[in-house]
Amino acid sequence: MENKSYPTLSRINRFASKILEWTTITLMVALTLIVAVAVIARLMGQSFSWYDEVAAIMLAWITYYGSALAALHRRHIGFDTVLLSMPYRFRILAVFVGEAIVLTFFFLMARAGFQVLDVLAGDTLISLRWVPIQFTQSVIPIGAILFMLCQLLSLPAYLKITAEGMSLEHAEIEEEVENELKKNKDRT
């Protein structure tokens, strides 16, 4: 999330956004190719034993990295209308309480993810014996840590916007309406 008041933080956010976007896009393209090749192979009578397991893992990876990207842009479900209807002091307090809850949840998730990795030491995938399950499940702590970092990177801009009484959702909707009005104005 960018804000002109925080130019250095905005550059870091853009950089993090590009990395997460490309990671997510690469995973989505790879998943699409794997599933397409597997379907074609199945139609030809040569089904792969590994594609189902790999596709499920890749879908989880896409979910975790895409979730971190959404956190960076503050695109997760929120309650802007409720938040902005509060008096200023309570609004700011609510933002900090909400952030503390989210960060605590993902901290606990990362911690549990590392514990799961310890338990899975030495195990491999069923269909691809050379792939350690620790590698496939490493997305849990990595995704949780990325989510926390993205929340923290986007917090100053979000706090400023919320303190000013502006809504991310409403601003986005108004921008889209203005763009559509401009497009339609040229048609008449």
Image (tube, rainbow, N blue to C red):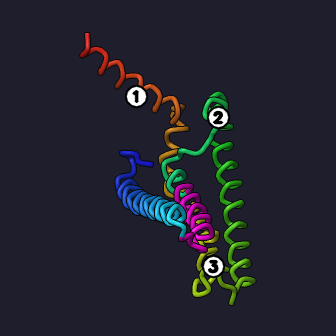
Q: Which residue is mark 1?
A: 175
Q: Nearer the viewer, mark 2 or mark 3?
A: 3
Q: Name the mark on residue 127.
A: 3
Q: Earlier in the sequence, mark 3 or mark 1?
A: 3
Against 166, is 124 above or below?
below
Whether residue 149 is visible, yes or no, is no
Whether residue 28 is visible, yes or no, is yes
What whole-number distance in Å separates the C-alpha atoms at marks 2 and 1?
A: 21 Å
Q: Is residue 62 left or right of residue 9?
A: right
In this view of the protein, which residue sits in the foreground, 20 or 33? 33
Q: Nearer the viewer, mark 3 or mark 1?
A: 3
Q: Name the mark on residue 83.
A: 2
- Amino acid bearing label 3: Ser
Q: Report x, y in % for residue 150.
A: 52, 58
Q: Nearer the viewer, mark 2 or mark 1?
A: 1
In this view of the protein, which residue sits in the foreground, 86 or 11? 11
The residue at the point 58 percent across, 45 percent down is 76
In this view of the protein, which residue sits in the foreground, 46 or 6? 46
Q: Describe the element under mark 3 as helix, strand or loop.
A: loop
In the picture as drawn, the residue positioned furthest to the front comes out as 45
**Which of the 4 image quarters holds residue 175?**
top left
Q: Report x, y in % for residue 126.
A: 67, 80
The residue at the point 54 percent across, 31 percent down is 165
- Dot 2 and dot 3 residues touching (CB under 8 Å): no
What whole-number distance in Å separates the C-alpha atoms at marks 3 and 1?
A: 49 Å
- Amino acid bearing label 2: Leu
Q: Is residue 43 left or right of residue 104?
A: left
- Amino acid bearing label 1: Glu
What whole-number distance in Å separates the C-alpha atoms at marks 2 and 3?
A: 49 Å
